[in-house]
């Protein structure tokens, strides 16, 4: 019986140091990301318990695009977002507390302008082009037009989030899109 009492005392002393106290000292944090598989790092870290192991009690909010979540960061509704690093850089000009702290994915080339029944970018003149405003999609589109000396006014830009672009093209809502 004495050995058992010492065992219970040891458990009582160690319990707060183990998992019980950690649950009480976790820092609450809300992070936001898109539903695109490219933003899977937050989901993986949450499911693997990596946040908890590092003292964080994380709630993940999702939206159509990681970059579209940056305004929530600026409004202090979330503490971190996963999106285009360019969205972080652009928004740093609005609020210098917004910083890109890490690059999670490195894509050598994964940019495209896609159009239906058009031969080239010029074929989209006068047509509806889906752009995810405020994201790498918009920056990429503007760069393509600049490099080809094309006038942005010649195109009808439509705000479409990345996961919806292909479906919007298939439905005929847009004639093409820029993904970046």
Image (cartoon, rainbow, N blue to C red):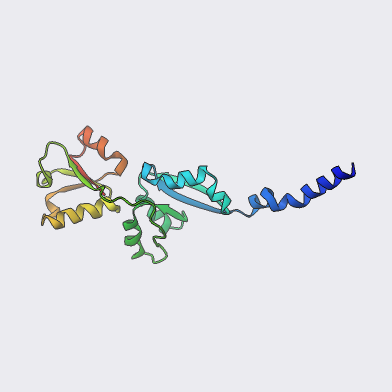
Residue occupying image coordinates x 11% and y 39%: 118
Count of labels in the image: 0
Q: Which of 95 and 122 is in front in this view?
A: 122
Quarter location, residue 54: bottom right
Q: Viewed as shown, does residue 36 lie left or right of 137?
A: right
Q: In which quarter of the image is residue 162?
A: top left
User: Residue 171: percent from the left, percent from the top?
Assistant: 22, 32
Residue 161 lies, in percent from the top left, at 30, 44
In this picture, is 162 found above or below 13?
Answer: above
Q: Which residue is drawn at 68% across and 49% down?
A: 20
Q: Where is residue 144 in the image (x, y as percent from the top left)?
A: 17, 53
Q: Is 111 rendered above or below residue 169?
A: below
Kindly give the residue lying farthest to the right in the view shown.
Answer: 1
> Vertical placement of 129 versus 169: above or below?
below
In this rendering, position of residue 109 left or right of residue 123? right
User: What percent of the width, then of the height, locates residue 147?
Assistant: 14, 57
Q: Residue at x 47, y 56 (%)?
A: 79
- The answer to whether residue 133 is left or right of residue 12 is left
Question: Is 59 situated left or right of 133 in this image?
Answer: right
**Residue displayed at 47% across by 44% down:** 44
Outermost front residue: 3
Q: Quadrant of the N terminus?
A: top right
């Amino acid at each position: 019986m004495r050995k058992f009492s010492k065992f219970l005392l040891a458990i009582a002393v160690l319990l707060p140091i183990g998992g019980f106290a950690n649950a009480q000292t976790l820092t609450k944090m809300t992070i936001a990301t898109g539903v695109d598989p490219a933003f899977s790092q937050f989901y993986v870290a949450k499911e693997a318990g990596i946040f908890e192991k590092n003292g964080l009690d994380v709630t993940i909010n999702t939206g159509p695009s990681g970059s579209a979540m940056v305004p929530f960061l600026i409004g202090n509704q979330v503490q971190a977002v996963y999106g285009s690093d360019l969205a972080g850089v652009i928004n740093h000009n609005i609020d210098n507390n917004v910083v890109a702290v890490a690059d999670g994915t490195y894509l050598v080339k994964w940019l495209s302008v896609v159009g239906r029944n058009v031969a080239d970018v010029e074929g989209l003149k006068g047509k509806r082009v889906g752009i995810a405003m405020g994201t790498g999609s918009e920056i990429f589109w503007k760069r393509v037009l600049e490099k080809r000396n094309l006038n942005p006014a010649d195109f009808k830009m439509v705000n479409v989030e990345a996961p919806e672009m292909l479906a919007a093209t298939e439905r005929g809502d847009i004639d093409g899109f820029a993904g970046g």
